[in-house]
Amino acid sequence: MLGLIPMFVPVSAVIPIQGVVNLTSNFSRFLFGIKHAILKWLPAYFIGGLVGTALGYPLIGYLPEKLLSIILAIFILLSVWTGILKKIGALINNNYIVSAFQGFISLFVGSVATLSIPLLMERKLNTKQVIVTSAMQMSVLNVFRVAAFFIAGFQFSAYTNILIPLILGSVVGNYIGGYLQKMIPEKIGATALKLIITVLAMLLLYKAVF
């Protein structure tokens, strides 16, 4: 999505607009698969995300997006292909800390869900639980992200021509994707998810470097 949106809007509008689209996309994915979500984690996601967003809000426009993207991409790749997460197990099992970190960085880097998925996979959830619980978490974080940019003065109404088709497309895509997901065996789904996250992290790294 980060590769598509800049074709239609200024670079400064990419992250706020992606926040709105991600909110509707993740919330619809969460609703379609709510029975697979780990709902008991929701309060921690809410509190942690709020704290992280509040800490990051004063820094909007000041932190270098490219540097943060490089660090995030490298960490994601290490998370997927090494045992680094096992060494920080206490941290990734604390939903408050994880959500605070993601809430903070979501104000500056678009692809935060790419980090959420390997963290959840490390906690031994099945593929459906990973996807829907990540969508639940991202829904919360994107509410705070959109609110932060709204308070900062971003005019979302000026971009309804791009927002409406992206929102509708994401909801329809989630409905179809949820139906197709039922046909995919767990082992294949987990492997595919790992490969998709790897590709997305490499794209994030490539765009930040070049």
Image (cartoon, helix red, strand yellow):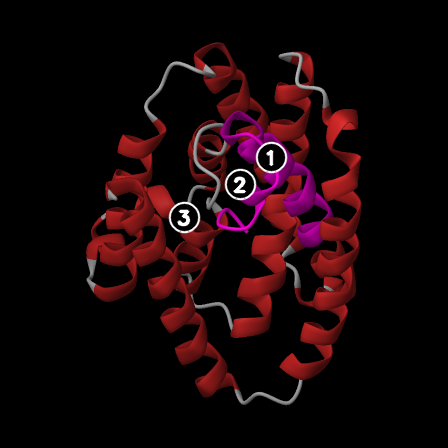
* Residue segment shown in magenta: 1-27
Label 1 Cα crowd, 10 Å radius (few <14 / some 14-19 / many 20+): few
Image coordinates for residue 55, horizontal then vertical, percent:
47, 16
* Residues marked 1 and 3 touching at CB (< 8 Å): no
Q: SS class of the residue under badge 3?
A: loop
Q: Name the residue that disc number 2 marks.
A: 6
Mark 3 to mark 2: distance in Å?
35 Å
Q: Residue at x 29, y 63 (%)?
A: 80
Q: With 61 as the anchor, is 45 left or right in this view?
A: right
Label 3 Cα crowd, 10 Å radius (few <14 / some 14-19 / many 20+): some
Q: SS class of the residue under badge 2?
A: helix
* Main secondary structure of the magenta stretch: helix
Q: Name the residue that disc number 3 marks.
A: 93
Which mark is in front, 1 or 3? 1
Tell me the amino acid under the disc marked 1. Answer: Val
Question: Is residue 22 at least partly visible in the picture?
Answer: yes
* Residues marked 2 and 1 touching at CB (< 8 Å): yes
Tell me the amino acid under the disc marked 2. Answer: Pro
User: Can you tell which mark lies on residue 9?
Assistant: 1
